[in-house]
Image: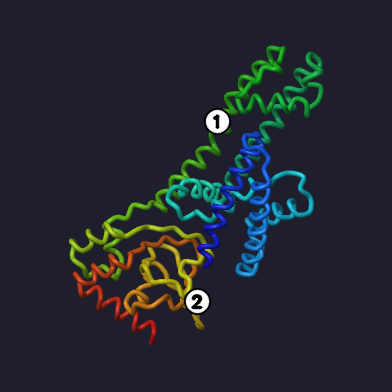
Amino acid sequence: MIKYINNIAGILILLNIFDQILSSSKIIPENIYFDIFVIASYIFFGTEFILRIVIERRFSFLLVFDFVVLANYVFFGFYDLRILRIFRAYSIYSNHKMLLPTNTLLRTVYNQRLALLGSQIMVFSVLLIFSTLIHFIERDINPEYFGSILNSMWFGIATLTTVGYGDVTPSSPLGQVLTSLTMFLGIGMFALPAAILASAYYEEIQKRNFLITMETISSIPLFSMLPIGALSKINDKLVAEIYPAKRKIIEKGDEADCMYIIEFGSVQVEIESPVTLGQGDYFGEKGILSKEVRNASISSLEEVKLLSLSKEDLEELMEEYPHLFEELEKVSLDRTG
């Protein structure tokens, strides 16, 4: 049920953003049907907002954004803030391969926030020093632009970023030399956060690489006894998926359409005495073996990478390799006592 609500919310968010863009450019003439669409969307968003608070039982970053959008529409209406819900759309479709680079970049920025903040503190320090020095040098020659340190900071920002708008230039030779040196320094200073992000982003992309190698498959205990031909066949059938922390993976009562193997991260089986599964473990096979619906909900405890195997592919493999069926059945029986 939650999955369907999220999908509807994602589609509505995208349609609302599209409507906001077209409405602002007057491409679409004012029409009562579009007004009804917006009102109906906000009613749905409000209901979904309450539902998420009940389920999550905490105010997350996305819930705060959604609250601002809803409160603005209901109580103030100063601006159309529907565009802010694009972050919710990113969250809904975060597992889609098309959004993998975007979500990975956002995660990289968050993970490297302290390093990036440190580099920007260095840039700001250099800006203050340069603005003060250029103020002392040029204040008598160009009092309009360099009469105070605050005025000099505009020129300092343009110089450090090597933009050089040309609206302000130093007149004295010493001021020109100082500005030239600062431009060279600015190139290096702004390359630092770019290098931090590039390095961390590459590591994150490699970690979340959707390419499944034979080495990865052979290291999974479930497949360790299978011949190389079977591993090759499994390699063609497995699909990699990334789930963030606290995300529902399996909902109790859903159809058992696939099983999952954990490559990294951990999940929790939500039963009377919760069970934690980690790297190399698998789940979701019981419903397929017994041909029943899911008997428990399972959520990610942290970011987790899963390798999913569809029901049809699993049944084909079990028929061809009975050892696989025996292993799955044994583990399934052990889990149910």
Residue 234: x and y, percent?
26, 61
Dot 2, crowdedness within 10 Å: few (<14), some or many (≥20)?
A: some
User: In the figure, is residue 316 to the left or right of 184?
Assistant: left
Coloured how? rainbow
Task: Give the amino acid type for the residue marked by disc 1 in the picture.
Answer: Gly
Total labels: the figure holds 2
Could you tell me residue 100's position as x and y percent?
A: 46, 49
Up the image or down, 301 lies above or below 272; here it is: above
Q: Secondary structure at mark 1?
A: helix
Q: Which residue is at 36% across, 62% downward?
A: 307
Pointer 2: what residue?
270
In three-dimensional space, the C-alpha distance between marks 1 and 2, rounded to whole angstroms, equals 51 Å
- The residue to which callout 1 is attached is 188
The crowding category of the residue bearing disc 1, from other C-alpha atoms within 10 Å (few below 14, some 14 to 19, many at least 20), is: few
Q: Nearer the viewer, residue 54 or 132?
A: 54
- Residue 297 in the image: state x and y as whole percent: 48, 74
Left or right of 293 in this view: 9: right
Q: Quadrant of residue 287?
A: bottom left
Q: Is residue 336 left or right of residue 87?
A: left
Mark 1 or 2, nearer chain start: 1
Q: Residue at x 63, y 24 (%)?
A: 182
